[in-house]
Image (cartoon, rainbow, N blue to C red):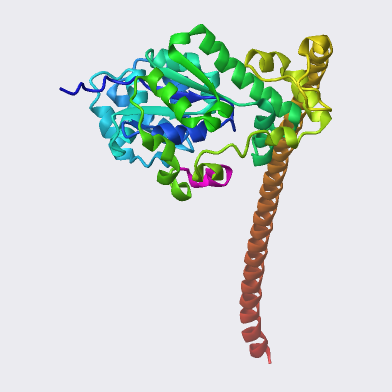
Amino acid sequence: MKQAQPALPPVFIIGAERSGTTLLRLMLNAHPDLAIPPESLFVDELYRTFSGKDLTRQDIPVIVDAMFADLKFPDWGLDRAEVTEALGQLSTLDLSSVAAVPYRLYAKRNKAKFWGDKNPYYSLRTDMLRELFPDALFVHLKRDGRDNVISLLEVNWDFGPKSVADATIRWRDYIVAAHNAAQEHPDSFIELSYEDLVSQPEAEIKRICKFLGLGFDPAMLEFHKENEGGKLIPDSQKRFQESTFKPVNTSRLGRGLSKMSASDVFTFQALSVDTLLANGYEFLDPVTRKPADAAANYAQYRTAGLVLEMESELKRQLADMLDERTEQMRQEKEIAVKRQNEFITKELERMHNLMKDYVAERTSFKHKIDYALSRLIPWRRKRR
């Protein structure tokens, strides 16, 4: 007799942005029993808004509004009415059950038994996810930061970093947060590298499946067929994810390093030397690009890293101050224009009233003249 598949805990794919998390999401999503939707931050929004509060049925409309307020949530294709109905059917309205509803609906729509999520930002929020879903499992995908940084700069997001230093700090903070969480909760985390995933995809996917307690399915290596033309990628993200339209390949390995100057390599390594070494990536000579002894120049790199980080933080603060001042000037201009419009409106109204008074006076004066003439003319005729 065939044994039933045991219940699978929620699965969260985390890692720095542009580290291959979308590729991994599509590979795991290709398993017939697992559904992983596009990115959304509605869980974070729910947690910030409702954590610690006793939810009641009267809160359901507000909860649904919070879910759909997330700009990416509509990409899941769920209907507001079905989400509202599912929330109403919950026996207990705790935050964990509430947050799981959209995932369960998405899995049901895709005929899957289990659900997961993929979001780089959740690398910084694993404590929140573990609080909501204590049995959750995490798959941390790492990528050589040199490739990651250049890929991040190439997409040129409005909200993204604009320099190698800023992109490095972003990569470092995400990978450090996720790696530290994995070290603290080893039974709930599995870590792998993008390099291994694209070089030996079957072995790595089988390793993940074993960790999850999920049987391997060959369809996971044929994910691109299901994603033909980017069908599983939101329209706003398609131009950033064209590599996922094709089978797994190693064409993007080392691209970042080939596009970096010696100064870029030095900046990157100065800001991330500890992170590189802790995660098994090579320390390179910035000029020759050959492996180098990090310990020999460690103090120099750490000092340079501290200076670069201070410089990056100062630039960020200056940019924030500039944005704040620009917004202040915009508001001041709006107030000035509003006051000017109010003054012009009042002046026009005053002139209109003056004109009305003038017309009224002219009309009254004319009536008086006409009356006087009407009295005068008969008198003059009589005198003649």
Examine the rendering and report whether any part of residue 37 can be seen.
Answer: no
Near-viewer residue (155 or 289)? 289
Would you say residue 171 sits in the magenta stretch? Answer: no
Instruction: Pick the quarter of the image with the C terminus.
Output: bottom right
Which residue shows up at 64% across the image and 17% down it?
A: 280
381 on left or right of 305: left
Residue located farthest toward the left when viewing the structure as drawn: 1
Residue placed at 47% from the left, 21% from the top? 139
Q: Residue at x 57, y 47 (%)?
A: 239
Q: Main secondary structure of the magenta part?
A: helix
Residue 130: percent from left, percent from top: 43, 14
**Nearest the camera: 267 or 325?**
267
Magenta stretch in the rendered image: 233-241
- Could you tell me which quadrant the N terminus lies in? top left
The answer to whether any part of residue 126 appears in the image is yes
Toward the top, the furthest residue is 184
Q: Is 272 situated above or below 36?
A: above
Q: Name the residue located 80 percent from the left edge and 24 percent from the top edge.
A: 266
Q: Which quadrant would residue 43 be assigned to in this image? A: top left
Q: Position of residue 301 (x, y in %)?
A: 81, 15
Query: Residue reaching furthest bottom?
Result: 384
Q: Position of residue 302 (x, y in %)?
A: 79, 12
Horizontal side of residue 30 vs 71, given as left or right: left
Is residue 237 a member of the stretch shown in magenta?
A: yes
